[in-house]
């Protein structure tokens, strides 16, 4: 049985939730959720990944927010506590999801401040 989270661990903006819902509808992925996870380290500390998933484990934490289901494995849960996910559509940078995590460590090369796009200047 999945563990239901009583308090919001991750916040997802209405724009990001709508983007996820659009992808699920377009691909006809009924019963899928947005899985958010720690995918390793880097110059910004922990890096985060996202995937559409319908294979849930008993140790996964799940919660519903803005009309979509989020799933987080128990290892990633603490690293993601307080994070927020947004979807941006920038004419220069393009469209995509952005994770803003207050737990991300500020690195000495100026990358960090809680937001990490996955690439840093060294």
Image (tube, rainbow, N blue to C red):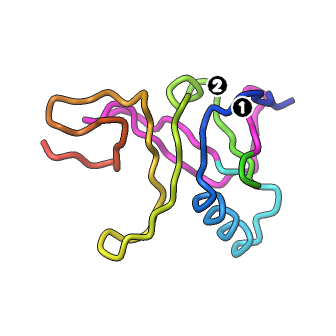
Image height check: is 15 above or below 48? below
Q: Which percent across, then down, holds residue 27? A: 70, 72
- Look at 42% across and 31% down and name the residue there: 102
Q: Is residue 65 magenta?
A: no
Horizontal placement of 112 versus 81: left or right? left
Which span of residues is magenta-colored?
Answer: 35-64
Query: Viewer-proximal residue, 48 or 95?
Result: 95
| Quarter of the view holding residue 26 | bottom right
Q: Which secondary structure type mostly characterizes the magenta part of the structure?
A: strand
Horizontal placement of 4 versus 115: left or right? right
Reading the image, the residue beneath label 2 is: 74
Query: Viewer-proximal residue, 98 or 2?
Result: 98
Image height check: is 84 above or below 20? above
Are circles 1 and 2 on residues that touch, CB within 8 Å? yes
Q: Earlier in the sequence, mark 1 or mark 2?
A: 1
Image height check: is 33 above or below 43? below
Whole-angstrom CA distance, mark 1 to mark 2, is 6 Å
Q: Is residue 43 magenta?
A: yes
- Look at 45% across and 63% down and name the residue there: 88
Q: Which percent across, then down, holds residue 74? A: 64, 25
Q: Which mark is residue 60?
A: 1
């Amino acid at each position: 049985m999945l563990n239901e989270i009583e308090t919001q661990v991750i916040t997802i903006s209405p724009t990001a939730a709508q983007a996820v819902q659009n992808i699920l509808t377009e691909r006809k992925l009924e019963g899928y959720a947005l899985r958010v996870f720690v995918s390793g380290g880097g110059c910004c500390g922990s890096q985060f990944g996202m995937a559409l998933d319908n294979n849930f484990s008993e140790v996964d934490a799940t919660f519903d927010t803005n009309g979509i289901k989020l799933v987080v494995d128990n290892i990633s849960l603490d690293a993601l506590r307080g994070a927020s996910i947004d979807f941006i559509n920038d004419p220069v940078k393009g469209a995509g999801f952005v994770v803003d995590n207050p737990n991300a460590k500020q690195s000495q090369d100026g990358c960090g401040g809680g937001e990490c796009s996955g690439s840093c200047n060294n």
